[in-house]
Image (cartoon, rainbow, N blue to C red):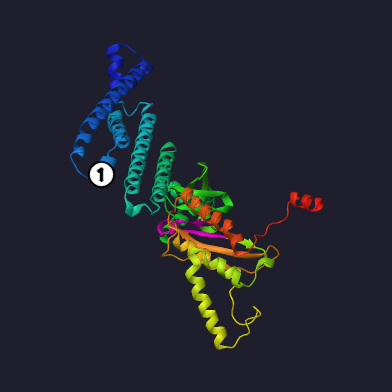
């Protein structure tokens, strides 16, 4: 039986229908605010004490302030939903609008609770090492989008007084529009699954994406975007799908390895490459790092030339050492003796094809430290030394002539 409280107010207070309705709405709102305040105080006082007694982190995050606030809002909404039909008579013209508004409030609060729950789930899993390389943020964002979509359908169906099935039956006609609107979300979700399945990128990875000018650490992986903090502290936002469709470099392998690669070369003038005569070998033998090498090689070469009756009066005959070859051995031994180089990883000095800029001599080794600043310092120290010792091997570095070189040539 409906309680016609509006008519009761009109009869006892002598007011008309409009005034009675306004008074009743005011009383209802005050009652709802009282229930909301009481619910908020009770939940915030009781739930945190219960979760503090447990050792798990799940309940602390799930029942956080965000969810407790939304639950405190849901309680008065449900009370309002059940009480309003009892306060207003079925014949009241304002009742359908109030009931519809109450339904919408319940839907909005329910959506708020569900999305808050997904946010809490994301916070929980992001703290666990097991899930740090998984697209949890993308999945929770997709779940939120679905929740918002369902909530929107329920609200629209309430406003037009039609069943949600009626709206869903018409989705086929606008499927193309929906796909267009959610294109980035769909592509991002598919890309997130592929990135996770192939373990292509994780939060904390150092990545380089040339097409987007990104070079730094991955901060966040979302449904539609991946945030990269560059080394100049700027942040580049890249579409998630770009990590599938475009090329990028992930430096995780280097970060997990025992060293960071050094790969850099110098250019030697071709006309300074020559055979080593006895005077050169005597000077080279005084260099501690290659002294034993020179001795062993001289003995080996003498034995070979003697056994094969080689005329050693001309250096081109038989076997002989070259200054570039001795220099190459010196660099390798210097790298192996360098405490900043990982001697257990590859150390190589190789010649590349000569060109108009001379003979490239490339150093290939691995620095023990992978920190950027230390790595650059180690590499600079190595090449400072290499460039300084080039003249000791009767070699010269190639460089294009500058204006000052031409002025000196003219003066000469």
Identified at 76% across, 49% down, the residue is 403
Identified at 44% across, 39% down, the residue is 156
Classify mark 1: helix, strand or loop: loop
**Does the magenta-highlighted stretch encompass residue 411?**
no
**Quadrant of image for the N terminus:** top left
Comparing 62 with 307, the one in front is 307
How many other residues sit within 10 Å of disc 1, few (<14), some (14-19) or many (≥20)? few
Left or right: 196 as drawn, with respect to 127: right
Q: Name the residue under label 1.
A: 57
Q: Relative to 293, does residue 10 appear above or below in the rendering?
A: above
- Residue 277 seen: yes
Comparing 6 with 288, the one in front is 288
Q: For the magenta stretch, what is the residue range?
A: 248-264
Comparing 369 with 101, the one in front is 369
Return the x and y of residue 407 as percentages of the image width and height: 78, 49
Most extreme residue toward the bottom, as rendered? 308
Return the x and y of residue 149 as percentages of the image width and height: 43, 45
Comparing 215 with 373, the one in front is 373
Quadrant position of residue 90: top left
Left or right: 44 as drawn, with respect to 337: left
**Does the magenta-highlighted stretch encompass residue 254?**
yes
Return the x and y of residue 15 as percentages of the image width and height: 34, 13
Left or right: 321 as drawn, with respect to 74: right
Most extreme residue toward the top, as rendered? 14
Most extreme residue toward the left, as rendered? 53
Q: How many labels does the image show?
A: 1
Return the x and y of residue 352 as percentages of the image width and height: 61, 68
- Residue 172 seen: no
Q: Relative to 266, does residue 183 appear above or below in the rendering?
A: above
Left or right: 116 as drawn, with respect to 335: left
């Amino acid at each position: 039986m409906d309680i016609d409280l509006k008519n009761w107010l009109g009869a006892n207070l002598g007011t008309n229908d409009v005034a009675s309705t306004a008074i009743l709405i005011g009383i209802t709102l005050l009652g709802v605010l009282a229930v909301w305040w009481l619910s908020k105080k009770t939940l915030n006082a009781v739930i945190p004490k219960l979760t503090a007694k447990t050792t798990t982190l799940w309940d602390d995050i799930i029942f956080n302030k965000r969810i407790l606030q939304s639950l405190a809002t849901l309680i008065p909404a449900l009370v309002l939903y059940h009480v309003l039909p009892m306060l207003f008579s079925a014949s009241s013209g304002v009742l359908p609008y109030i009931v519809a508004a109450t339904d919408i409030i319940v839907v909005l609060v329910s959506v708020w609770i569900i999305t808050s729950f997904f946010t809490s789930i994301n916070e929980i899993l992001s703290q666990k090492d097991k899930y740090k390389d998984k697209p949890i943020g993308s999945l929770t964002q997709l779940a939120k989008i679905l929740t918002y979509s369902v909530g929107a359908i329920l609200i629209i169906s309430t406003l037009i007084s039609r069943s949600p099935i009626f709206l869903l039956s018409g989705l086929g006609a606008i499927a193309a529009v929906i796909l267009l609107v959610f294109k980035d979300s769909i592509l991002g979700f598919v890309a997130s699954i592929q990135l996770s399945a192939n373990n292509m990128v994780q939060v904390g990875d150092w990545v380089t994406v040339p097409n987007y000018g990104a070079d730094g650490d991955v901060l966040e992986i979302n449904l539609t975007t991946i945030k990269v903090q560059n080394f100049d502290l700027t942040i580049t936002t890249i579409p998630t799908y770009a990590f599938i469709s475009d090329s990028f470099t992930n430096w995780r392998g280097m970060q997990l390895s025992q060293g960071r690669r050094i790969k850099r070369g110098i250019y030697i003038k071709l006309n300074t490459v020559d055979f080593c005569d006895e005077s050169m070998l005597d000077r080279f033998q005084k260099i501690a790092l290659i002294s034993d090498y020179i001795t062993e090689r001289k003995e080996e070469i003498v034995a070979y030339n003697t056994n094969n009756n080689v005329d050693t009066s001309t250096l081109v005959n038989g076997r002989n050492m070259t200054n570039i070859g001795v220099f190459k051995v010196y660099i390798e031994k210097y790298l192996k003796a360098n405490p900043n180089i990982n001697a257990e990883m590859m150390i190589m000095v190789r010649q590349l094809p000569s060109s108009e800029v001379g003979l490239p001599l490339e150093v290939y080794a691995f620095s023990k430290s992978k920190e950027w600043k230390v790595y650059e310092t180690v590499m600079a120290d190595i090449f400072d030394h290499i460039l300084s010792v080039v003249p000791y091997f009767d070699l010269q570095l190639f460089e294009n002539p500058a204006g000052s070189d031409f002025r000196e040539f003219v003066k000469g």
